[in-house]
Structure formats: C-alpha cells, structure tokens
Image (cartoon, coloured by chain):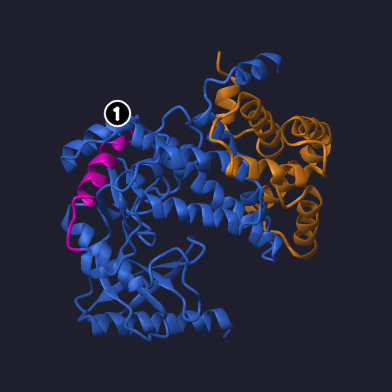
Chain colours: A blue, B orange
Amino acid sequence: MNDAVASNEVLAQAILDAAHRAGFGTRGIEGLKRLSGGASKETWAFDLVLSDGGRRPLVLRRQPPGRRFATQGLDNVAMEAAIVKLAATAGVPVPGVAFEMPEGSVGGDGYAMDRIEGETVGVRVLKAPELAEARRGMARHCGEILGRLHSLSGYEKLGLKAQGSREALAGLEARYHDTLQDRPVFDLALRWLRENLPDEGERVLLHGDFRNGNLIVGPDGIRAVLDWELCHIGPRAYDLAWLCVPSWRFQRPELPVGGFGQREDLIRAYETASNVSVDRAELHAWEVFQTMNWGVMCAGVAKAFMDGARTIEGAIIARRASETEFDLMRLLAPDNSIWSEVRNAG
Amino acid sequence: MQDKPSAELLIAEVKNALGTAIALGFAQKVAANALGIAQREYGLAPRSLAQEFDRLETLVGSEGDLAERNRRLSEDIRYGSGKFDDVLVRHLILTTLAKIEVDQPTYPPYLAWKNEK
C-alpha cells in the first residue's frame, strides 16, 4: 500500500467519523476523489452511503492539518460553513452544508456540502452552448444575489474582519509596497483612488471573491456561489466592482459584467433586491480599485517567485500584472489621444 | 520596464521542468506560454526599453539606469502635485502597451482595443 492510498483511507475514516458525530447513519463512503481547486484549500468529492441504502453526493472543502491558512482569508473553514448557512437564509444559492469536521480531526479543518452539478470554469461558462440561455439572465441574477447578501444581518457575532474604503485603500497600498516593485501605473492609480474613492459609507456582509469562476452554472442559471473564504464586511461596491474587473471577462471583454452581461442589468436587479441605489461613479472608482487589486495579487506572485517559490504557473501569473496596467490606463485615461495615434501607426 | 521573472528565468524554469517530467496537456501549454514570453522579450524589449529609457529622461532626468529612473518616477507620482500631466500619461500608456505586447499580446481587452475602428 503506498502513502497516497494510506492517507486517502485516513481521510475517508475522518470524514465518516465527522458524519457520525453529526448524526448521519451510514454504511460508508465511496468514490473519494480529489478535485482540482484552490491554492490554499483542497476539495474532495465523495458519496455518503446512508443506512437506508440512499446516497448523498458531497464535497469536502478542507484545510489539510498543518497547512497555513490564507493570510487574507477567514481564520478557519468552520467560519466559512457558518457564513454559507447564513447566506442560504437570505435566498443566496449555496451548497447545503451537511456536516463539519470536528476540531482536531486528522482530516483537517473543513466541512462537507452538497455536490451540485454544473460548470464552474469561467471560460466554459462563457462559451458552452447549453448555457446560452443562462448567460442572458446572469447579470440580473448576480445583482439579485448580491442585493440579498448585502441586506443580511446576523453576521455581527461571527467576528469577521471589517474594512471600510480608507482601510481597504491603505491595505492595497501596503500590499503593493510589500512586492518591492516600482510600478508607476500603480502609483498613478493609487493617487487617483485617494482623490476619487468615496469615503466611508454603509458597511455590509461581502462575499469578497464574487466573480465568474466561483459560480456553479447550469442551463437554468446560477446554481451556487462558492469560495467564501475572502468574506468580510465592507462597502457594497466592493463585490459589484470585482465582478466587473476586465480579467474576469475572459474572452468576452465587451460584456463588462463577468463577460456575460451589462452593468445596467446588474445594477437594476441589485437595486430592486436591496432597495439601495448604486452610485455609478462610486462603482467606477471601485472598478479601478479592484483592477489594481488583481494586479497587486499578480505582482505578489512575482515576489514569491523571486523569493524561491518557483513554478512555471507562478511565473505566468506574475507576468499577468501588466494586463491590469493596461486596464488601469484604459480606465484612468481613456480619452488620451496617444491611444489612437499608436493604433493608427500600428 | 519588463516585469520579473525575466526571460532568462522563464527559460530556466521551463528547462528545469523538462529535465524532470512535464505532464502532457495543460502543463505543457503553460511551459510553451512561458517560452513565448521569453522569446518576445528578447525580440521586442531591447528597442522598447531603450525608448522608455529616453522618455524617462524627459520625466525624471538623465541620472541612473532604467530601474532607478522608474523608481524616481514612482516616487514623483506618489508624492506628486496631483495633476495628471499629459507627458506622464502618454509615457505610461506607451510603456504599458510595450509590456503587454511582450507579456500577453492576445489579452482579450488589448485585442479588442487594437481592433476598435
């Protein structure tokens, strides 16, 4: 028996123990399989075989024991389960939480949720012919989901990080300086943001990473919102703007909302669901913020590469920082005559 | 200025991967992508970096190499007066276009801009 098989059996037993503790009568688990996924978290698919012979298809999302949690994210995965359950109460589509891994489990920190069929890969969500009808309604559906999420209360006791616009901007600047790179375009964007990002407004419960790529989509539309680990409390426009960052439009840059829809559809649905109006200039300022935010993440990967975390994938992400500089200059100086001078010369 | 990792490091990393084992399919494509960046950097950057270096002289003076001039430009913008000078903005746009032509000439928003009427 090799190590991988042995560790899979340990994990399978840990999952079964957690299911029993949560009150499930089971015959066992079958088909345990690692899914590809996030850099910091693992996801595993399996079927829980119930005492009556029925099956419940589940996914375990976990932080393996001993691995450091993402620095920007929640303190633990159990907190994420609590947020997912809370979001469900507002009608946000999320996978049902089946059970959590008890503290100190050899399977790590995590929770099991319903396995929902559908497409999650951003490029395919925008391309699959069978999702054409779903795409037409997705900007509105996203607005409705975010409007509901942002109207939630009851998160106050969860101990989430709260960050208003000034703190968010200071954090962005600090993370940029941590990369030890001089990027005049980022400095220009920061200066523009200091003048244009609106001051403190109302703070709400944010998803924190709401974009095409973190949604399960079927022919009927968005079936579930995933990856809640960057959830925090902050300004509404944070989530709306992140969804509109050019990099998340993949091959469809002409459709500003996730590569599938128009801003006005997103905004109108959001306003209807939340009963709060969206300031277009504020949304634009947050789009500048979020575009730079993705750029700083890429620049951070460059720093990690130079510090010794050498992978080809890391190198490619590092060299994607320049796409955000292009997008920032388009956002900050769209009318400069140099654009057409270069294009006409080229 | 081109970002890190440099063309040389990109090639070194792909060479490393080829020396051990490289999975068919996705990993192979990523490696080819890295070599593409390095190839374009060797082909295009000498000219574009020289142009950037010259433009920087107008903006921050003639002292220092490319990295030092960019550092001074960053600081000028950071602690600057607050006006977006046209010479500065034109320089940043030209520099950004030269970078993306090396890093990712097929980036969809860039292609969409190029094909605008």
Left or right side of A196 for A224: left
Query: Is residue A69 visible to the viewer in this orientation of the structure?
Result: yes
Residue B32, image x, y percentages: 72, 46
Q: Magenta span has B40?
A: no
Looking at the image, which is closer to me, A51 or A32?
Answer: A32
The image quadrant that residue A240 belongs to is: top left
Residue at 27%, 74% in the rendered image: A99
Q: Which quadrant of the figure contains the C terminus of chain B?
A: top right
Residue at 78%, 40% in the rendered image: B41
Q: Magenta span has A150?
A: yes
Circle 1 residue: A264
Q: Amino acid at mark 1?
A: Glu
Residue B104, image x, y percentages: 65, 38
Position of residue A178 relative to residue B29, above or below, is below
- What chain does badge 1 belong to? A
Residue at 17%, 41% in the rendered image: A273
Looking at the image, which is closer to me, B72 or A63?
Answer: B72
Q: Which residues are magenta?
A: A135-154
Left or right side of B97 for A287: left
Q: State the predominant SS element of the stretch in magenta.
A: helix
Marker count (numbered): 1
Looking at the image, which is closer to me, A96 or A311?
Answer: A311
Q: Which quadrant of the figure contains the N terminus of chain B?
A: top right
The image quadrant that residue A109 belongs to is: bottom left
Position of residue A174 relative to residue B61, above or below, is below
Disc 1 packing (10 Å; few <14; some 14–19; many ≥20)? some
Residue at 82%, 41% in the rendered image: B63
Q: Residue furthest front?
A: B81
Q: Secondary structure at mark 1?
A: helix
Position of residue B64 relative to residue B86, above or below, is below
Residue A35, image x, y percentages: 46, 63
